[in-house]
Image (cartoon, helix red, strand yellow):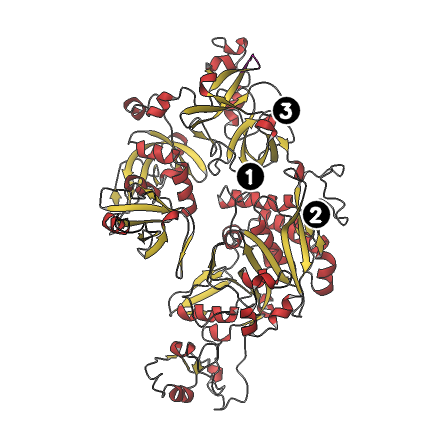
Amino acid sequence: MTSILSSAGDGNCYYILTEDCAYGSKYFQAGNMCFCSERSYLRNFSDDRPPACFLKVIMLDDSSTVTINIEILQPVRKETAVFLLAISSHNERLNYFLERLSLEAALRAVPGQKVMVEVDQQYFPGIIRYIGSIYKNTSAVLSPVFFGVELQSEGENRGRSDGSYHGTEYFKCKRNCGIFLPFSKVQFISTPDNDYAKQKPKPDTEEMVPVKVGDAVSFYVDQVLTKGIAMAVYREGTQWFITVCPEEEGTTDIFREIPMDSVVKESLQSLFSPFESDMGLQHPNQMKRERSESGEECESGNSSLEVNSMVQITLDKGNQVSGIIRWLGYLPQIKHKMAGVELDEDKGVTAGEWLGKYYFHCAPKRGLFVKLQSCQPDVRFQCSHNSDLSLTGYRGQEVLPQASESFPPLRNEAAVRVLLGRMKGIQGHCNSCYMDAALFSLFSCTSVLDSMLFKPFPLCDRNVQSILRDEIVNPLRKTGFVRARSVMHLREQLTEKGRCSSFTNAEKDPEEFLNLIMHQILGIEPLLKLQSGGQKEQDCYCYQIFMDKQEDLVVPDVQQLVEHSFLSSDLKLVEIPSCFIIQMPRFGKEYKMFSKIIPSLELDITDLLLDSPRECCVCGNVATLECAECFKDKVFAAVGLKQFCSSCSRQVHSHYRRKMHKPTGLHIPEEFHSRSPWGSQQVPREKMELFAVLCIETSHYVSFVKYGPENEHWMFFDSMADRHGDENGFNIPTVTLCPEIAKYLDLSLAALALEQPRDMDGVAKRLFCDAYMYMYQSKKMALYK
């Protein structure tokens, strides 16, 4: 076993999580950081005992002690860890750790060095004035390291300080010209006038490798001298190779992998014609090139392509890759118009950087710079009716179902007539299943969140709202089909508005998508308002169930899970929600707390409401006391919080086993004080109706939607159920009916617990065993929100 001991110099070993991890009721995302003492590490991995598979560590975020599989721990040096800690996003932190180039540049940076820094999604020049912690008097094991930068030229007055932070001065500059940033927001440039560049020798690896990405090179192809551009430089074993894009004219880039000793580095002037290289003469397109560095389109290469166009590119050996154009313009040392493309897969060579400058941002190995003429429109999303891959012909659906009027949700026979079949629902493409399943669940058969489509909320982005309404929801309700391009249009907007480059191609979770579009982009009112122990109200859009493993809950239903979670967290609903989205106690595709969960077709939230009349669980009178300890007492019912009137509470707690219980008082609404002792009328019950369930299996999300009132009125949606063609084909979304679910809903708890998942009929196994998110609605409250 390989040692993961990482000496930090302070007696601690530091690590970063490379995968998501659950420990008890806590969940830690990949990118979280932790540490343990060297003594603890050595005690676990001493020579006189078998190698340990788990390591007890302390999380840097919340100081909790957890035990983690060492396979998902990567050691981090202390001097590196302090830079990573300054990045608040765990996913971004992990990406920068794996990518390394920016991190290594940050480690080498010194005060006085010129940099470009990101402020409000734009880059401005500046000079590093301070590198260090900005948190004083902290007891944390590690303190994050930030860069204090003095902004210059067009960056002036875009800062947020004069070199001070929270009353402490770290450097001096003019007001609003100073800013403190993590290294992820800094581009470290090396120019001849940098003191740092003069003082520091280049790393050995750069001295050993004469060719770098972006260099012009010459090489022989079939005894013919050919010129090209180095797109990537890498080593396999002891030999170095270059990925070269030939400069020959053509419609596609055929990248070639060539040994380093078979290429010759060209000078810059060899790229241009003799006229262009004459002294004193300027390239006629030079001004256009300079303007194009901001991403503006300057000349027609392929006039149909622009920023955000979906394209295909042919690589070496005829392999094709797909992606989205993120930048258009001219690059230094290259005379052709270039496109910066974010690929769907990790087949690129950059994160949007070219010769030390970022022209766009994407995940490492997802970026590629190619000649614009080498990009072809992605045929999977072409609308030509003559194309073999045209979507026309699948039950007569139009490729571009644009709706100028609004359509109501589909119910009962109408839902079956419009939605059922192949090429129905929302077409999946490039890890979009999380969004496809969520949108189908929320809008196909219910109107509970239709306010998202029309209402002008405070932060409402009308472009996103119109795409959601006119390109997705209305076509779905009118024709039963939404093409992948419409969803990609929405994903592009989420990428732009959400400041996250991965929404167009990466796997996400539904709650991440819902929080982004509801909170940050549309700004709708939070779906849930919660209060814990009399503290300040908390707002949220999705509720995650957190709970310790309950031995008595072998096959729980949603009602039991929600009650256990609310009770353990001392939570109450401040008001009845119109839509209640509940995440199950599972984390990703690996960890599930329960092998099966029974859908509760109705969710009774009466006892979860703050300051609402409650019913004594013994006599039915108005309850005045609630007992958390009695909730787990097996003498009482399996579901429902345990609240009592004063008389019943005295009797229940007279038992010697319950004498130590500590009931808490309940607030009784004024109108219920005058009720007769025996309560001639029942306490009103507030119930919500289940309308959809999202499930996940092996990283793929699917959806179950209840389209009618009967137990067998369920439909199953998979946005990638089948596929037409190979790499250049497209996914076929499918909606099927699944009445077999009713059979299992009618089983007793004992019988359902004994059911083997592999033996369950149809797709029932996925609903009962793979549930990820339950969606409930209150039709009464939906009228007001």
Instruction: Locate residue 525, reporting x and y percent.
Output: 51, 59
Residue in the picture at 65% in, 53% down: 473
Spatial CA span between label 2 and label 1: 27 Å
Disc 2 residue type (three-letter): Gln
The earlier-in-sequence mark between 1 and 3 is 3
Numbered mark located on residue 402 in the image: 2
Q: Kindly give the residue lying farthest to the bottom in the view shown.
A: 677
Numbered mark located on residue 251 in the image: 3
Q: Specify few, some or many for label 3: CA neighbours under 10 Å numbering under 14, 14-19, or 20 or more.
A: some
Instruction: Locate residue 752, reporting x and y percent.
Output: 56, 70
Query: Secondary structure beneath disc 2?
Result: loop
The span shown in magenta is 222-226
Taking the magenta stretch, the answer to whether it contains residue 3 is no
Q: Specify few, some or many for label 2: CA neighbours under 10 Å numbering under 14, 14-19, or 20 or more.
A: some
Taking the magenta stretch, the answer to whether it contains residue 224 is yes
Instruction: Locate residue 24, reporting x and y percent.
Output: 39, 61
The earlier-in-sequence mark between 2 and 1 is 1
Of 647 and 467, which appears nearest the observer? 647
Query: Secondary structure beneath disc 1?
Result: loop
Q: Which residue is mark 1?
A: 344
The answer to whether marks 1 and 3 mark residues whose Cβ atoms lie closer than 8 Å is no
Instruction: Locate residue 267, reporting x and y percent.
Output: 46, 14
Residue 26 horizontal side relative to residue 130, left or right: right
Residue 681 horizontal side relative to residue 399, left or right: left
Is residue 576 in sight in this rendering? Answer: no
Disc 3 residue type (three-letter): Thr
